[in-house]
Amino acid sequence: MPKVTEAIPDPVLNVKSALTAAGVEDTVRIFTDKVPTAAAAASVLGCEVAAITNSLIFDLDGKPLLILASGAARVDTALVAKLLGTGKIRRAKPDFVLKHTGQEVGGVAPVGHPSHIRTILDVSLKQHPVLWAGAGDHNSMFSITYDQLQRITNAEALQVR
């Protein structure tokens, strides 16, 4: 009997397409076990938690703000708001995240969204030669360099903690 293979979920296909369209290698890896946290991902990948890039969606006056932050620290939203010269930045609710990214909380990727989202990139990530980011669901990650990530997301480099 032929082996049944699972189809790749649409959000992961969107990430894979976004990576290749941006001219970077499709390095998406799909794992059997879920990797919904930076600690879980680092454990599976054998890297430092600080090299995991969390894709965090915030609500800034009703519009999404994507902050790509090191998995080793919490984002200081008051600091980010001050540096951006904006109003209060609030953690987005799961339905807001899904609406704007097409991806569920815990699996949000830096790319592959229905439309471009304003993006901030944590400058502390620059110290890692290889970063790992979520690839659209709870079982997928991809590797990328800091410079590539900044380029493909059109991110503004900023101190976030």
Image: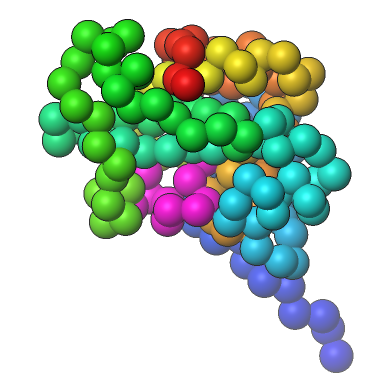
In reply to whether residue 20 is colored magenta, the answer given is no
Question: Magenta residues, as a range?
Answer: 98-109
Left or right, residue 117 beside residue 46 = left
In reply to whether residue 101 is colored magenta, the answer given is yes
Decide which of 23, 121 is in the foreground and name it. Answer: 121
Q: In x, y percent, where is residue 47? A: 81, 38
Q: Measuring 78% from the left and 18% from the top, which residue is drawn there?
A: 129
Is 91 placed above or below 25 here?
Answer: below
Is 142 placed above or below 66 here?
Answer: below
Decide which of 131, 2 is in the foreground and name it. Answer: 131
Q: Measuring 62% from the left and 34% from the top, which residue is drawn there?
A: 72
**Furthest residue toward bottom:** 1
Q: In this figure, which colouring scheme has been used for the structure?
A: rainbow
Name the quadrant containing residue 132: top right
Q: In x, y percent, where is residue 19? A: 60, 31
Q: Measuring 16% from the left and 21% from the top, which residue is drawn there?
A: 87
Q: In the rendered view of the protein, which quadrant contains the N terminus?
A: bottom right
Is 88 placed above or below 129 here?
Answer: below
Would you say residue 14 is visible in this rendering?
no
